Structures are given as structure tokens and as C-alpha cells.
Image (cartoon, helix red, strand yellow):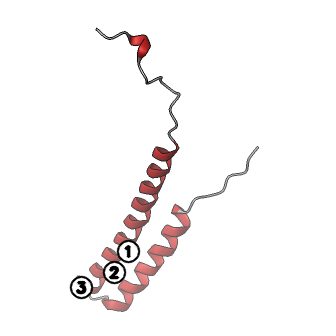
Amino acid sequence: MADPAHHEYHRGEMDISMQESTFHLFMGLTKWASLYMAAGLVALVLWFCTPAGFLAGAIAAVVLVVLGTLVLSDKKTASH
């Protein structure tokens, strides 16, 4: 059996900055893509599935994007 003292890996000593940046990029892209897909879906549903028409669908999509951007944007917190 291999001696556990000669392993290369030591818990907590590895640089994970690349994994962190990849995770944050993926989560950001997922967040914004979900918002824009939801806005597109709202626009298409209002345009084709209701008598509201194109203009109501476009206005609703723009409102959803603006509100979603305000809610989902990263807030800067005050450092203490």
C-alpha cells in the first residue's frame, strides 16, 4: 500500500482562483441568459397567444429586462 505521507495533494493548499473565476463567469452568464430568455418568452406569448399584440409584448419584455437588470445586478456593499 502507498504511504499516505507521500501524496502530492494537501487539503486547502491548492490555488483555486481559476475555478472561482470560471464559476462566477458561468453563474453570471446563466443569470443574464435566463433574464433575456424570459423576456423573449413573455414577448412571444403576448404577441401570439393573446389579443394584446406585438406592441404590448415588446413593452412587457422591455419592462421585464429593466426590472430584472435592477434586481439581478451586482450591488456594491460597503466595506467595514
Give neighbour class at mark 3: few <14, some 14-19, many 20+ (Cα, 10 Å).
few
Give the numbered dot on residue 20: none
Mark 1, secondary structure of its residue? helix
The reply to whether callout 1 and callout 2 are in contact (CB within 8 Å) is yes
The quadrant the C terminus occupies is: top right
Q: Amino acid at mark 1?
A: Ala
Furthest-right residue in view? Answer: 80
* Residue named by callout 3: 48
The reply to whether callout 3 and callout 1 are in contact (CB within 8 Å) is no
- N-terminal-most mark, 2 or 3: 2
The answer to which quarter of the image holds residue 38 is bottom left
Q: Amino acid at mark 2?
A: Ala
Q: Measured along the vertical axis of the image, is residue 19 above or below residue 67? A: above
* Residue named by callout 1: 39
Position of 44 with respect to 58 (left or right) is left
Q: Amino acid at mark 3?
A: Phe
- The residues bearing labels 1 and 2 have C-alpha atoms spaced at a distance of 6 Å
Q: Measured along the vertical axis of the image, is residue 63 above or below residue 17? A: below
- The residues bearing labels 2 and 3 have C-alpha atoms spaced at a distance of 9 Å
Furthest-left residue in view? Answer: 49
- N-terminal-most mark, 3 or 1: 1
The percent coordinates of residue 49 (x first, y second) are 23, 82
Give neighbour class at mark 2: few <14, some 14-19, many 20+ (Cα, 10 Å).
many
The quadrant the N terminus occupies is: top left
State the residue at coordinates (51%, 27%). Answer: 12
Q: 39 or 13: nearer the eye?
A: 13
* Residue named by callout 2: 43
State the residue at coordinates (55%, 67%). Answer: 70
The answer to which quarter of the image holds residue 64 is bottom left
State the residue at coordinates (37%, 9%). Answer: 3
The percent coordinates of residue 52 (x first, y second) are 32, 88
Please name which of the two marks, 3 or 1, marks the residue nearer to the observer: 1
